[in-house]
Image (spheres, rainbow, N blue to C red):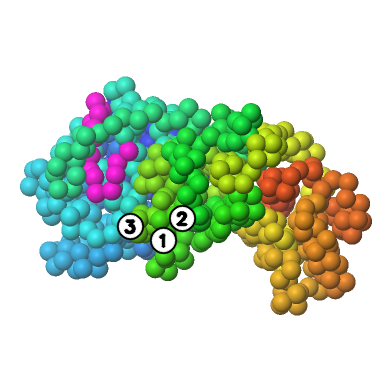
Amino acid sequence: MCGIITYIGNQNALPRLVDGLRRLEYRGYDSAGVALLTKDGLWVRKAVGRVEALSPELIDPPETTIGIAHTRWATHGGVTEPNAHPHIDTDGNIAVVHNGIIENMDALKKQLEGEGVVFRSETDTEILPHLMNYFYRGDPLKAFTTALKQVRGTYGCAAIFKEHPDRIFVARNGSPLVIGLGEGETVVASDPQAIVAHTRRVVYLEDREIAVVTRDGVDVMRLDGTAVETSVELIDGDYGVADRRGFPHFMLKEIHEQPESIERCLRGRLDLNQGNARLGGLNMSPRDLIGVNRVINVACGTAYHAGMVGAQAIEAMARVPARAEVASEYRYRHPIVHPDTLFFAVSQSGETADTKGAVEEILLKGGQMMGVVNVVGSTIARTCGRGTYIHAGPEVSVASTKAFTSQVTGLLLFTLMLARTKNLSVIEGQEVAKNLQALPGLVQRYLANPGPIDDAVERLIHARYALFLGRGLSFPVALEGALKLKEVAYVPCEAYPAGEMKHGPIAMIDEETPVVAIVPNDSQREKALSNLKEVEARGAKLIIIHTEGDKELEELATVSLPIPACPWYCSPIISVLPLQLLAYRAGVALGRDIDKPRNLAKSVTVE
Ligand code: AGP
């Protein structure tokens, strides 16, 4: 996904902009560029590829304390240097960087070409500097806002004007922007990751707001010019600066960080005495909870899989109907929203467009909306207004790992709260609370001895096709395992409920087909075992994730991956671990770009 970083302050802008671009790299992109404002005008350099590819262009840069920079994830127009941002107007007066999509691009482009403007790129973004220049009569703020009022679509954008080197103009409508207030410097970025190195004091722009940014601070107003009362917030202490801590890839670091991240998610939220959980951010009393008669989790990708686990746990433990919905489907299905339904938007980034759209639709229909979010202050978290942060810390690798286990942990905490108001006794609740508290230790224990992962990798990396199977809570884990293997190692595979595999997919099984099965020692074990025997009879090579000590499964497996015993509701958090490692090591074996896989973005902020 595109990334924006701007700097205005008392230090040299370029190194700070390049550092900011590097901190945004994990979002996924295909080109990058910077624009500096000097006494001689705009100095613009861009390049296709990673930020490293930009470095050779940054020879003999001018010293200046104001600039903007961008990483582009192509939406309109190919991956070319002319299409990279920043874009400037014909006269070289204004430079702009932009995230989002200008839906009325064609009409505006035609209007500008009629005024003699010659476009140099295929992008929608290039419209902005030309439009601003068209309206510029000496007042940059007026030109900036007038131009944006012509635009239909989404933007997070920043502009610098040659004749006004003391200000940067930023605006937001659908693409996030965070303003970091430092000492004598102000940094604006697409997400807090690029700001925490400078300051933790931030102002979050809302949709249809603009800001005039100077080295001393920020002046926020609405697009119609009315003033906005800003509140300075502090980025959460846990939301540290992501660093690899000596690991070769962020993905591996984040896999091994899970004992810590789960512990942070649990911290202060378990009441062992009452056998209950406390999620203050939900702002729901037991009286409120007892009125909840349905739960719906909306999310995308890995977060959707976490939502599936949460829904099954809620239904099984609290005996309340619950389900997970794919956000991009749910938002356009004209959903029926009941007042006694509690909705959770599950999202690591808190910026996923489809999840955000589902949240807005549910709120518009009067639904009770909560967030289960990692990035503090993100759009979904603020739009929901209530919910729980999972405190996983920055998740940099595009492939989500620690966010998944912390999303599930957060939903299990809610499950316990709801179940205790419904049908769980204090003794039963104490048992659940104790088992949740033990999760970080169990995760640590598995990661310390993960078993013959490489044997499984050997059987998967050259497979023409692989099938992941699971029943009950292990089915969303199978989905998650298949997604990880696809997105990190690009291995063709799919996941199916084990009992469903006979209704078609079994036709895909031939000699040597690897089948990855998640079969913990739960109520579905016997059924899953018979499914495995069906595929084994047809030549499949079984990679089985099973509870340690399960000799029958160990003998049936071609590759046996034992995991520590745990209660049924904890098993998804443990059984996903070998699948994360499997995908990681397969990606390494195949020489993939582990933290930034092809075509993927960390936060999909466009539909
Ligand atoms: C998972 O590894 C992917 N990165 C992707 O499926 C991701 O989970 C999905 O895009 C949702 O992102 P979110 O949690 O930030 O909303």
Kindly report the distance in space between the C-alpha atoms of the residues bearing marks 3 and 1.
10 Å
Q: Report if the CB atoms under discs 3 and 1 are less than 8 Å apart.
A: no
For the question of whether residue 432 can be seen, the reply is no
Circle on res. 364: 3
- Position of 398 with respect to 98 (left or right) is right
Cβ of mark 1 under 8 A from ligand 1:
no
Kindly report the distance in space between the C-alpha atoms of the residues bearing marks 2 and 1.
7 Å
Label 1 is placed on what type of residue?
Val
Label 3 is placed on what type of residue?
Leu
If the image is split into quadrants, where does the C terminus sit?
bottom left
* Image x and y of residue 126, in percent: 27, 57
**Residue at 29% over, 44% down:** 206
* Image x and y of residue 306, in percent: 59, 51
Kindly state the secondary structure of the residue where label 3 is placed.
Answer: helix
Question: Which of label 3 and label 1 is nearer to you?
Answer: 1
Circle on res. 337: 1
Label 2 is placed on what type of residue?
Thr
Q: Main secondary structure of the magenta part?
A: strand
Q: Report if the CB atoms under discs 2 and 1 are less than 8 Å apart.
A: yes
- Position of 302 with respect to 80 (left or right) is right
For the question of whether residue 126 can be seen, the reply is yes
- Position of 523 with respect to 93 (left or right) is right
Kindly report the distance in space between the C-alpha atoms of the residues bearing marks 2 and 3.
14 Å
Of 134 and 470, the residue lying toward us: 470
* Image x and y of residue 123, in percent: 32, 60
Magenta extent: 204-218
Circle on res. 341: 2
**Residue at 82% over, 45% down:** 451
| Residue 199 location, quadrant | top left
Task: Confirm whether the magenta stretch covers residue 160.
Answer: no
